[in-house]
Image (spheres, rainbow, N blue to C red):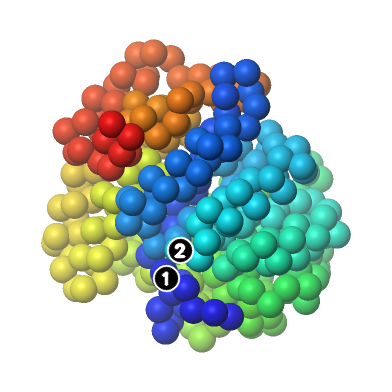
């Protein structure tokens, strides 16, 4: 695999935020705005970008739209930073086809949740292992396992460690479950050579504890990655007090995003900062209440993040 920015001799690490998918007010994809989203994220100093994830509203996209966004984003990034492409699907065949398509388009990595559909249709442990093994056999780029509550699938530490040991490509793990730090610590201890990239997610709401547990990367939203990155840098250089101070400064905004806004926060801030023209989300999602929108922006303005001034 060609070495990319965002990769060190120890693999990919750092801040890999999720790119939102901008829509025009009528609901159509806004591809010029998508390119501006990517440009803004690169100017935020990110180490890489993740596309077509849950915070990209992937569950509201058609297959054709997915393919369009894949090509637009990867063509526009043009190797400037590594791009992780989410390929989750209940069908192993479809997940495999998505992964092949992502690799052919230039993805540095693919990310997948375990196979599930709704609240009651889930693969058992054998099915999960076979699912990831099939994708690993189909591509040569790394695979990140997303362990998130949305799937409802229990991924034990033993199962995750077994995936890493069985397939060298499956070396990256985005853990965003309750007690993430404990799970990260246990996973690293269970497969220290095989777990190349332990990441957290969920907007970085437990970031400091997760870094203490051994996380080497984080996958937040694209709201304030420029302010999250110093936390990782200080922590990695052994300056935990500085990391803690930086984290304390941004934690109210992270908490508000996580508990009050969800994926709509980034779009709201990007529209306020002139990155995109509309913060529209697709139905049945609903826009933020005006009061919630203003409270979010009031939390962000004193921190002067790139997102609020990029297009102004």
Q: Is residue 225 above or below residue 286?
A: below
The x and y percentages for residue 72 are: 61, 49
Q: Residue 245: in sight, yes or no?
A: yes
Instruction: Tell me if 272 is positioned left or right of 38 in this view.
Output: left
- Measure the C-alpha gap from mark 2 to mark 1: 5 Å
Whether residue 19 is situated above or below residue 75 in the rendered picture:
above
> Do the residues bearing badges 2 and 1 touch, measured as CB atoms within 8 Å?
yes
Q: Secondary structure at mark 2?
A: loop
Helix or strand or loop: what does disc 1 sit on? Answer: loop
- Residue picked out by circle 2: 81
Q: Is residue 174 above or below residue 141?
A: above
Estimate the x, y position of residue 24 in percent, counting from the top left: 57, 24
- 287 and 126: which is toward the camera: 287
Q: Position of residue 233 (x, y in %)?
A: 25, 66
User: Residue drawn at (39%, 13%), measured in percent from left and top?
Assistant: 290
Sequence-wise first label, 2 or 1: 1
In the picture, which quadrant includes the C terminus?
A: top left
- Placement of the N terminus among the 4 image quadrants: bottom right
Is the residue 311 above or below the residue 174 in the image?
above
Residue lying at 70% horizontally and 53% vertically, measured from the top left: 88
Which numbered dot is residue 5? 1
Tell me, yes or no, if residue 203 can be seen here.
no
Q: Nearer the viewer, residue 299 or 39?
A: 39
Q: Residue at x 58, y 32 (%)?
A: 30
Quadrant in the rendering for residue 281: top right
**Within-10-Å neighbours for mark 1: few <14, some 14–19, many 20+:** some
58 displayed left or right of 239: right
């Amino acid at each position: 695999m060609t070495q990319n920015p965002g990769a060190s001799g120890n693999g990919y690490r750092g801040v890999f935020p999720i790119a939102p998918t901008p829509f025009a007010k009528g609901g159509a994809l806004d591809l010029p705005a998508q390119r501006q989203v990517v440009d803004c994220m690169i100017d935020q100093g990110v180490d890489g970008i993740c596309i077509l994830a849950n915070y990209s509203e992937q569950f509201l996209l058609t297959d054709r739209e997915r393919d369009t966004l894949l090509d637009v984003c990867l063509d526009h990034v043009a190797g400037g930073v590594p791009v992780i492409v989410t390929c989750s699907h209940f069908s192993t065949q479809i997940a495999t086809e998505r992964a092949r398509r992502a690799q052919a388009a230039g993805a540095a990595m693919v990310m997948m949740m375990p196979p599930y559909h709704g609240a009651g249709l889930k693969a058992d442990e054998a099915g999960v292992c076979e699912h990831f093994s099939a994708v690993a056999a189909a591509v040569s780029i790394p695979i990140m396992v997303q362990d998130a509550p949305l799937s409802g699938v229990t991924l034990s530490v033993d199962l995750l460690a077994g995936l890493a040991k069985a397939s060298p490509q499956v070396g990256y793990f985005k853990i965003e479950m309750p007690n993430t730090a404990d799970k990260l610590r246990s996973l690293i201890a269970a497969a220290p050579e095989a777990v190349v990239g332990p990441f957290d997610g969920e907007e970085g709401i437990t970031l400091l504890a997760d870094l203490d547990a051994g996380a080497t990367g984080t996958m937040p939203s694209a709201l304030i990655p420029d302010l999250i990155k110093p936390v990782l840098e200080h922590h990695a250089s052994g300056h935990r007090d500085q990391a803690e101070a930086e984290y304390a400064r941004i934690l109210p905004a992270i908490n508000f995003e996580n508990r009050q806004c969800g994926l709509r926060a980034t779009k709201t801030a990007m529209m306020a900062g002139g990155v995109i023209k509309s913060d529209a989300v697709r139905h049945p999602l609903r826009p933020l209440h005006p009061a919630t929108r203003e409270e979010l922006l009031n939390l962000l303005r004193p921190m002067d993040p790139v997102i609020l001034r990029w297009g102004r």
